Amino acid sequence: MAKVASKLSGTRVLLAMLTILLAAVIPAVILPNLVCREDRKLDDLGVVPAFSLVDETGQAFTEEALRGHPTIVNFIFTRCDTVCPITTMKMQRIEDRSRDKRGIAVKLLSISVDPEHDGPAQLAAFAAKYKANPERWRFLTGKPADIKALVEGPFMSPMDREGVTTSGAPNIVHSGYFFLVDGELKIRGAYDSNDVHRLDQLLHDARYLARTQRDGYRFGGT
């Protein structure tokens, strides 16, 4: 009888330990995965309209290149010696952090707010400086009026010239925000690039869109 009681006692201990283990594992592992799979409410800040610009290779680049995958958009110019190097390094960091299987669908797009100077050659040199992967990160220029309409229109960002900096470079006031565009060309958020937590949220939201929008479009056009 003592041996039977001992076995029963041992079984109860094992069951108790298993119960405690499951109680710890379910909230820590299973529930977060379920939460991540839930639909999330992102902003709807309007739609990117039709546009026709050129990229750093001199090839035409239109809004159709943004379909089917999330795209992170920012604004730069190659002669900028103030905020642009910083924001471009932050974009570079995003590209580095999203090279895994789930993040690779996230694309990046930098639009020059100095199109009078920044032609494809200047943008290509700028892209090479930051080791931008052309399969994921592109740079755009075009007619000044077309750039201005896109930047100040749907992206609601300034691109005003206010003299020159101490180095002689033009002082072009432009947004330091990064924008998230989904595969249906909707602008789903604006993120302050000076806020590290917002940049983390940006990548988190982009990954979410990448999981839910995979239509097989090639970046730069079909």
Image (tube, grey):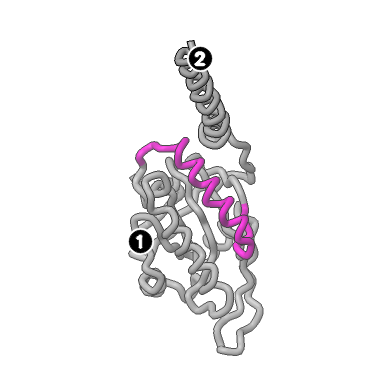
Q: In the displayed structure, does residue 116 sit left or right of residue 58?
A: right
Q: In the displayed structure, does residue 167 sit left or right of residue 216?
A: right
Please tell me whether residue 199 belongs to the stretch shown in magenta: yes
Residue 217 point in image, percent of width and height = 36, 42
Question: What kind of secondary structure does the magenta stretch mostly adopt?
Answer: helix
Is residue 96 visible in the rendered structure shown here? yes
On screen, residue 81 above or below 7: below
Residue 187 point in image, percent of width and height = 58, 47
Q: Magenta part of the protein: which range?
A: 190-216
Decide which of 205, 8 is in the foreground and name it: 8
Decide which of 86, 80 is in the foreground and name it: 86
Marking on residue 152: none
Decide which of 24, 122 is in the foreground and name it: 24
Q: Mark 2 points at which residue?
A: 5
Decide which of 175, 133 is in the foreground and name it: 133
Taking the spot 48% from the left edge, 45% from the top edge, the residue there is 207
Inspect the image, locate mark 2, and give the three-letter code of the amino acid beneath it.
Ala
Q: Name the residue under label 1.
A: 133
The local crowd at label 2, few if under 14, some if 14 to 19, many if 20 or more residues have their Cα within 10 Å, is few
* Callout 2 touching callout 1 (CB < 8 Å): no
Q: Which of marks 2 and 1 is in front?
A: 2
Dot 2 or dot 1: first in sequence order is 2
Taking the spot 50% from the left edge, 39% from the top edge, the residue there is 184
| Residue sitting farthest toward the front | 2
Inspect the image, locate mark 1, and give the three-letter code of the amino acid beneath it.
Asn
Taking the spot 58% from the left edge, 51% from the top edge, the residue there is 201
Q: How far apart are marks 2 and 1 (CA)?
A: 68 Å
Residue 150 point in image, percent of width and height = 56, 57
Kindly state the secondary structure of the residue where label 2 is placed. helix
